[in-house]
Image (cartoon, coloured by chain):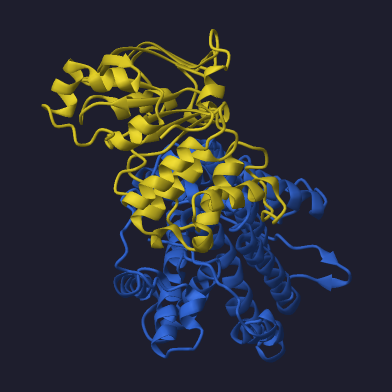
């Protein structure tokens, strides 16, 4: 279902003009957008997209649908509140910001590795169930633990450092910070998909049994993938707590966990740009659907959007775009997306399509 | 056809040089006995064919050797080492390879990426986050194998787009990767055209003398041409073992497997 496709950049100078346009737009965006648009509609989807990217990496490349990626990001957010400073008078150990951030990201990666170690022997629906159980358990744990996680209230007053004379929570600097981090992980995943590890991960997705017969430890490969996904989600979690200025159990609740899954699926898991498309669509709906309908109907809108995408474009917005592109017959569209030419060819029996 | 190197292989040291030793190996699936009390030894560098009708337990035998489905009882020794309880990938790292009856390939990856993974799988750097360079050892080996199985012009084609025959050839390339010492071929010629069969026989015959293999093959022409010894299986047990000539002329075997009188599938 979620096949990752390769783009062969056959453009003048090797640069896709559309991609160039997107880059220019992203960099120039805060110059013409209001603070609200820069912060809420600019930075926020980049953070959600990065968290969803960690899921795309696991699910699209590795065939492992983990519901607990938001838990991993939320864990990093909590560590920042607990080890750094907060305004609620619980914990807030006052560690220097850089140490807090490093520990938060590594802590999230370790939690992700742990989740991977528990779930990597399962496949398909069982992976979903186990990671969902972990997410729910973590949610209730932080909600009921007042000594460390301050229970229902959580933490507030969490600030990014003021560095180089810049207050990083100001919309424009924060937007560029999230853009830089999102872009870094986007390109890292794109590059890594063709690395030895990335190829191995896709091989594990396509055919775990055969991967063993090549001398590769499938379990270890999966767990290592969870570690990297934890680095991505954890870094996004740090950004998320700086963005919100607070963290409470709601952030690791089932609602948010499902939102991340929706973002990844709606965007499309075939390429690392998918989760960012999904996140933009999600945030736009979240902000502007209430102009059309009641606030409490927001989930209905999201649900309907999800249903429409899944029904009419199983590979998400990315697939929708691809079909539009081949319909208007851009000259290089077919070559670019590697459209299967020989559909009549014998199909491999041993390669089940898998989520 | 006489293959080159047969004489050279016969001169290889034999005693204590077993690539594979099976000791009373059985495999049950619930109440079903797929394979019972198999005792079998394969010398290092030996070329062995395993024959038998469908359900004779041939693929079960392979699964027990590789660990895909470990035996319910008995011991498996590879190159003198007891591997009965080792996971599949550890056995592979010791020089064992196999192909599958139904092509099990990575359909989302290209031909060269499939072979590269196979070469890298047994070596170091399985978890490297860097893309393989052209002069990477495993990549160079992959290019060589790509050429050996005649898939040069499909190098960057996604595996899902290959024809059946090409997928079988790729299966063989994956099994030849790394430094194999014993390869299990599970019906590599199934569904191949006559000329592709010729290519396959050529590849099998040109393997270096220290590389042994066990071959499951229904095509007697292929099996008896490349094998030095033959093991006949029937109903999950070993029925007869011997040289191709002995097996072919054995009246019981003819009765059981080759049919009465006319054995048109044998070598003419």
Q: Which chain is yellow?
A: B
B119 up-or-down from B210: above or below: below
Q: Which chain is blue?
A: A
- Residue pictured at 72% horizontal, 89% vertical: A31
B77 up-or-down from B126: above or below: above
Between residues A76 and A225, which one lies in front from this camera angle? A225
- Residue pictured at 34% horizontal, 32% vertical: B223
In which image quadrant can residue A127 be found?
top left
B35 up-or-down from B220: above or below: above
Quadrant where the C terminus of chain B sits is top left
**Looking at the image, how many numbered discs can be counted on the residues?**
0
Quadrant where the N terminus of chain B sits is top left
The x, y position of residue B245, in whole percent, is: 31, 21
The x, y position of residue A131, in whole percent, is: 44, 45
- Residue pictured at 29% horizontal, 17% vertical: B246
Q: Residue furthest left?
A: B260
């Amino acid at each position: 279902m979620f096949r990752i496709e390769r783009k062969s950049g056959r453009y003048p100078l090797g640069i896709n003009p559309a991609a160039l346009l997107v880059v220019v737009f992203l960099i120039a965006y805060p110059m013409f957008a209001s603070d609200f648009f820069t912060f809420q509609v600019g930075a926020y989807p980049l953070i959600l997209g990065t968290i969803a990217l960690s899921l795309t990496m696991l699910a699209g490349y590795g065939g492992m649908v983990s519901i607990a990626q938001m838990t991993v990001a939320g864990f990093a957010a909590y560590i920042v509140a607990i080890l750094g400073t907060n305004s609620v008078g619980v914990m807030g150990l006052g560690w220097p910001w850089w140490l807090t951030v490093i520990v938060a990201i590594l802590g999230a990666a370790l939690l992700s590795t742990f989740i991977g170690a528990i779930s990597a022997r399962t496949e398909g629906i069982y992976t979903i169930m186990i990671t969902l159980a972990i997410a729910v358990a973590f949610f209730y744990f932080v909600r009921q633990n007042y000594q460390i996680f301050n229970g229902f209230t959580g933490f507030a007053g969490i600030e990014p450092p003021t560095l180089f004379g810049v207050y990083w929570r100001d919309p424009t600097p924060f937007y560029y910070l999230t853009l830089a981090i999102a872009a870094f992980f986007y390109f890292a995943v794109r590059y890594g998909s063709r690395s030895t590890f990335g190829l191995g991960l896709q091989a594990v997705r396509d055919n775990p049994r055969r991967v063993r017969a090549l001398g590769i430890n499938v379990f270890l490969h999966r767990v290592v993938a969870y570690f990297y996904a934890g680095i991505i989600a954890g870094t996004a979690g740090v950004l998320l707590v700086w963005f919100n200025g607070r963290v409470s159990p709601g952030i690791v609740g089932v609602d948010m966990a499902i939102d991340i899954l929706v973002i990844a699926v709606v965007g499309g898991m075939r390429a690392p740009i998918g989760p960012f498309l999904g996140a933009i669509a999600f945030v736009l709906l979240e902000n502007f659907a209430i102009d059309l309908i009641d606030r409490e109907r927001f989930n209905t809108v999201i649900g309907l959007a999800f249903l429409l995408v899944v029904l009419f474009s199983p590979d998400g917005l990315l697939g929708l775009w691809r079909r539009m592109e081949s319909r208007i017959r851009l000259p290089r569209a077919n070559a670019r997306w590697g459209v299967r030419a020989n559909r009549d060819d014998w199909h491999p029996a041993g390669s089940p399509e898998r989520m | 056809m006489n293959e080159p190197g047969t004489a050279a292989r016969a001169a290889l040291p034999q005693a204590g040089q077993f690539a594979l030793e099976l000791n009373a190996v059985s495999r049950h699936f619930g109440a079903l006995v797929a394979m019972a009390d198999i005792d079998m030894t394969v010398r290092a560098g030996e070329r062995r064919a395993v024959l038998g009708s469908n359900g004779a337990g041939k693929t079960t035998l392979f699964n027990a050797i590789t660990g895909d489905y470990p035996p319910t009882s008995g011991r498996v020794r590879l190159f003198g080492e007891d591997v009965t309880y080792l996971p599949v990938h550890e056995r592979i790292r010791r020089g064992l390879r196999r192909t599958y009856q139904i092509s099990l390939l990575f359909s989302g990856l290209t031909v060269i990426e499939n072979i590269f993974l196979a070469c890298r799988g047994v070596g170091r750097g399985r978890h490297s986050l860097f893309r393989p360079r052209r002069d990477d050892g495993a990549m160079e080996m992959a290019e060589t194998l790509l050429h050996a199985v005649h898939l040069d012009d499909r190098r960057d084609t996604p595996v899902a787009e290959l024809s059946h025959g090409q997928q079988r050839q790729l299966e063989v390339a994956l099994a030849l990767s790394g430094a194999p010492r014993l390869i299990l071929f599970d019906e590599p010629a199934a569904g191949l055209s006559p000329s592709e069969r010729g290519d396959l026989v050529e590849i099998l015959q040109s393997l270096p003398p220290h590389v042994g293999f066990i071959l499951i093959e229904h095509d007697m022409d292929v099996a008896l041409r490349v094998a030095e010894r033959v093991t006949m299986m029937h109903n999950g047990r070993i029925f007869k073992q011997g040289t191709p000539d002995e097996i072919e002329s054995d009246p019981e075997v003819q009765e059981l497997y080759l049919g009465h009188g006319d054995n048109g599938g044998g070598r003419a």
